[in-house]
Image (cartoon, grey):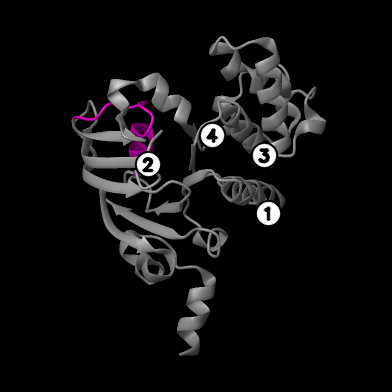
Amino acid sequence: MSPLNTPIIEVSHLSHRFSDGGLGIDDISLKIARGEFVVVAGHNGSGKTTLFRHLNGLLRPDSGDVKVDGISVTADILRARQMVGLVFQDADSQIVGETVCEDVAFGPENLCLSHAEVHRRVTSALSAVGLEHLADQKPHRLSGGEKRRLAIAGILAMEPQVLVLDEPFANLDYSGMLQVLSQIVHLHRAGKTIILSTHDLDKTMGHASRLILMKNGSIIKDGLFENVIRDVACAGVKMPCTCQMEALDR
């Protein structure tokens, strides 16, 4: 068992270029502690999604390394994908089952787990996101917020230690956003390490402890949320309304 002070995620001098030669991320290094709630912000094309896809081996680095709980992702990709669950911005792209229950069961079934263990994981995951009452529903009939929660449930059924969410509030109405935010906060309080990207920092103020700003494939600011929040403009990110009002009051 790893010591408690071992970072759950450790990124060392990570760089990636796409096949067309475009720079994705450039010499990124960071450590994320077990149980942190981290927000990564930056304009479109800043490298957030590219970074996220390296955390469980969906992309391979040109140079550098990512370790999950002390072990390199490239050394054991299956382990990394079980420990780091990635929820994509497009929830529909992760829905594969004919029913809500079948969709959540897809991942555990592919691990060749027993029927009883698959059932336990599905029940637990649906309960965690508040969708147990929709277990037999067709996924295409769900609302946007429910689909995003279903995508989260599918990842939770793999029992990851880290939950990575790429723009989890995108294209959701206010009700759907509140549903998803509530579940994310609940999961963090239950002990999950949370890493998410968002353009709207108002939603995560008061919940996240750390804010990382990215620009042109690099990290330009990293620190306590309340210390970094006033520098978001340099990353092309809108300052939260609360901070704007405080600035006007001065």
Measuring from the top left, give residue 46's x and y in whole percent.
32, 48
In-front residue for pair 168/36:
36
Q: CA distance from mark 1 to mark 2?
A: 41 Å
Q: Amino acid at mark 2?
A: Pro
* Mark number displayed over residue 90: 4
Q: Please give the name of the residue rendered at 36% of the width and 44% of the height, measured from the top-left corner.
A: 48
Mark 2 element type: loop
Asked if residue 124 can be seen in this view, the reply is yes
Residue where numbered disc 3 is placed: 144
Q: Do the residues under discs 4 and 3 have CB atoms within 8 angstroms?
A: no
Q: Is residue 101 left or right of residue 152?
A: right
Nearer to us in this view, 220 or 233:
220
| Towards the viewer: 61 or 117 | 117
Position in image of residue 140 (x %, y %) = 71, 26
Residue at 45%, 82% in the rendered image: 247
Question: Measured along the vertical axis of the image, is residue 78 above or below residue 40?
Answer: above
State which mark lies toward you, 1 or 2. Answer: 2
As helix, strand or loop, the secondary structure at mark 4 comes to: loop
In-image side of 175 versus 241 (left or right): right
Q: Amino acid at mark 1?
A: Tyr
User: N-terminal of the two: label 4 or label 3?
Assistant: 4
Dot 3 falls on a residue whose secondary structure is helix
Q: Amino acid at mark 3?
A: Gly
- Please determine whether, in this image, residue 189 is positioned above or below residue 228: above
Residue 174 - label? 1
Q: What residue range appears in magenta?
A: 48-62
Foreground label between 2 and 3: 2
